[in-house]
Image (cartoon, rainbow, N blue to C red):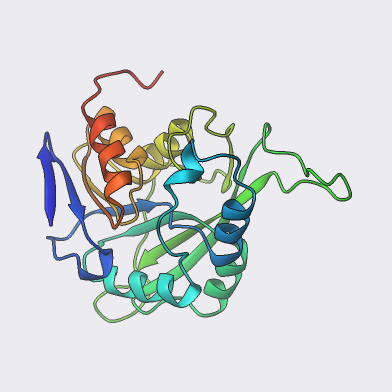
Amino acid sequence: MLIYNQAGIRLYHQDCATLDVEPVDVMITDPPFAPKTHQNARTNRSGVDGPVALIDFDPLTYEGLLARLECLASIVRTWAVFTCEWRYAARMESAPPSGWEFVRCGVWTKPDGAPQMTGDRPGQGWESIVFLHRLNAKGKPGRKKWNGGGRSSVFHHGVCRDAMYPTQKPVSLISEFVQLFTQSGDTILDPFCGSGTTLYVAKQLGRKAVGCDISDKALGLARQRLAQDVLLY
């Protein structure tokens, strides 16, 4: 169901598996928690306020993510870029979802990431990033283009300290994705848009965007952010 349509940004309240829109240029997203992370977040919550209190959705299994990526292959023309549970990324490299070529696994390093609270092992301090590319009409890898030349797939950004939503990604990280993988006027799809960071960045950088989420609470936050006219830097 379309719930927002302004300045080239559209928001849908539904599961992305049922999304029926015209083709978009690129997908940039952050899928929901994997089951282990979802459980840890719920177990370690303190009080009832703050972003973790907004976790009112089920975790996303690997099979669920794979199925949605396969559905979305029909409407994405080129790249799919998304942060991902590292175990999911490893599985996807050996068996990519139908319609997609697995191109690379990158990392987002967090210089200010959370420490290991038990103190008995190193903290993780990073998240995996998956780069897929749409197969061509013959089911073969197609020609790829991006704005990064030969740079590495390592991204250094601090965590989002003013997050309104669980695992909200920093604007600076998503802005770098948008600038590397899109051109002015492109349309970006975020099928798990949460509080709308990708849509917010798209608006600020002159891209159109389509967002989708099953959480009405998340979509409420996204609409609030899209109503703001602020500079990225």
Eyeballing the image, is 107 above or below 184?
Answer: below
Quarter placement of the C terminus? top left
State whether residue 110 appears in this view. Answer: yes
Extreme residue in the front direction: 47
Q: Nearer the viewer, residue 114 or 134?
A: 114
Quarter placement of the N terminus? bottom left
The image quadrant that residue 20 belongs to is bottom left
Extreme residue in the right direction: 120
Eyeballing the image, is 97 above or below 212?
Answer: below
State whether residue 149 appears in this view. Answer: no
Q: Nearer the viewer, residue 128 or 186?
A: 128
Q: Is residue 151 left or right of residue 11?
A: right
Residue located at (32% from left, 34% from top): 201
* Coordinates of residue 110 in the picture (x, y in percent): 64, 38
* Coordinates of residue 80 in the picture (x, y in percent): 38, 58
Residue located at (43% from left, 40% from top): 165
Eyeballing the image, is 202 above or below 30?
Answer: above
Q: Nearer the viewer, residue 92 or 147?
A: 92
Q: Is residue 74 left or right of residue 4?
A: right
Residue located at (75% from left, 39% from top): 115
Q: Is residue 36 left or right of residue 57?
A: right
Residue located at (24% from left, 20% from top): 229
* Coordinates of residue 10 in the picture (x, y in percent): 16, 45
* Coordinates of residue 71 in the picture (x, y in percent): 28, 73
Q: Is residue 205 left or right of residue 155?
A: left
**In this figure, what is the number of numbered marks?**
0
